[in-house]
Image: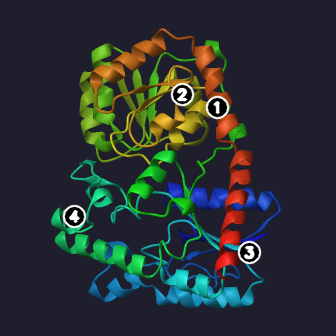
Amino acid sequence: MHILQVNNYDHVRGGSDVVFFETSQLLKHAGHRVTPFATIARGQQRNPENCYFPTTLDTRKAGVLSTPRFLHNRAARRGLSAMLSDLAAVDVAHLHIYYGQLTSSILGELRRRRIPIVQTLHEYKLACPIYTMVRGGHPCDLCVNGSTWNLVKHRCKDDSLSRSMLMLAEFWASRLQGDVRHIDRFICISEFQRKVMLRAGLPEEKLMVINNFVDVDAFRPCASNEKGDYLLYFGRIEALKGVPTLVEAAHQSGRRLILAGTGSWQGELAAFAGRSKYIEHLGFLEGEKLHDLVSKARAVVVPSEWYEPFGLTVLEAKASGTPVIGSDMGAIPGLIRDGIDGFVFTAGSIESLTAAIERLERSDLSVLAQAARSDVLDRFSSSSHLAKLMGVYGQAIERNDRES
């Protein structure tokens, strides 16, 4: 099968870009032909693969003159059209995040050529114009349940009227260009996300759930007698990630807590760590150092206080043979089997989190660890993901054939 993989960027800037590259590699290893289409940074060297890519728009410096391209990128459509004219027939186009850079301008070109379209939803953009379902530092579903005009009313984008109006304009420009109508199948990365999209009015028959995956072989559990005495948090150091609740719970209960990561709350974290002997912040870690820290933790804590569309840190911890204590927000509770491979607590509640930690202390860590890794092998492996993905591609092709 020849698959067009479409993404805003040709390099990693966030988690969705990682999924874009990992999905492409997964398909290639399975013997499929994969052709990418993305934007390219100004000044980056051109080659036969990226010669059709439009230049990346610097949205941080975007002004009035660049607004039309933010809403409808003609260069992206021209580049895609030229590439498709030179390529062998494409069986299906798989979109990731494309709005704001490539924009919905590409949808008309794909539909004109009768190419089936699948899109992975990495966030909540089709239900919330600023993608996050967060307003004023708190979870919000006003646009999901009501009017997207709430975005402007509450100045949800950076507390700015002009930026909020631009995001609303982009939302409706994309809708008019077919960001729902032209897509044959949407891949929701969690059941929670699927339910949000249903509430937002997306057609149920178009919504499929395929969880993100991890390469289980890349994670090595340690022996039970090598487990440390610490709880671990790794990820962005942000209030919405539940870090303030976590450090307070660890301090009050006298549990050793290690945090790895950076973010806007790290100044407050440093101050807290300075007055608590139980809290240790290691900053940004990656590779073997992080893997070793995860595998030897008694548990990884995922205390998010916003609607997480997924929770890759949960899978990485479980693949490492480490149980997870996670909040009941968004997709997280669907990734943890409470009492079997981890524990779920009420988001934002120090008391509930402390109780979950106490449940961990009363449990057999070796049993939890084995169950955690087994669950990832059963539900979140690359082979399982590939099989489901090919099934969705088949559905998109069938629907496209019926309507052509």
Residue 150, disc? 4
Q: Which residue is tagged 1? A: 375
The location of residue 288, given as percent across then percent down, is 61, 37
Mark 4 or mark 2: which comes first in sequence?
4
Q: Which disc number belongs to residue 91? A: 3
Q: Note whether residue 311 is visible.
A: yes
What residue is at 56 percent from the left and 61 percent from the top?
205
Mark 3 surroundings: few (<14), some (14-19) or many (≥20) residues within 10 A: some
Label 2 Cα neighbours within 10 Å, binned few <14 / some 14-19 / many ≥20: some
Indicate which disc, 2 or 1, sits on the residue closer to the N terminus: 2
Image quadrant in which you'd find residue 144? bottom left
Cα separation between marks 4 and 3: 39 Å
Using the numbered discs, state the Cα–Cα distance from disc 1 to disc 3 in whole angstroms.
33 Å
Instruction: Name the secondary structure under disc 1.
Output: helix
- Disc 3 to disc 2, how far (Cα)? 38 Å
Three-letter amino acid code at the position of disc 4: Asn
Q: Position of residue 208 (x, y in %)?
A: 58, 55
**Viewer-nearest of discs 4 and 1:** 4
Question: Coloring scheme of the render?
Answer: rainbow
Q: Amino acid at mark 2?
A: Arg
Question: Horizontally, is 21 left or right of 75 in the view?
Answer: right
Q: Nearer the viewer, residue 44 or 108?
A: 108
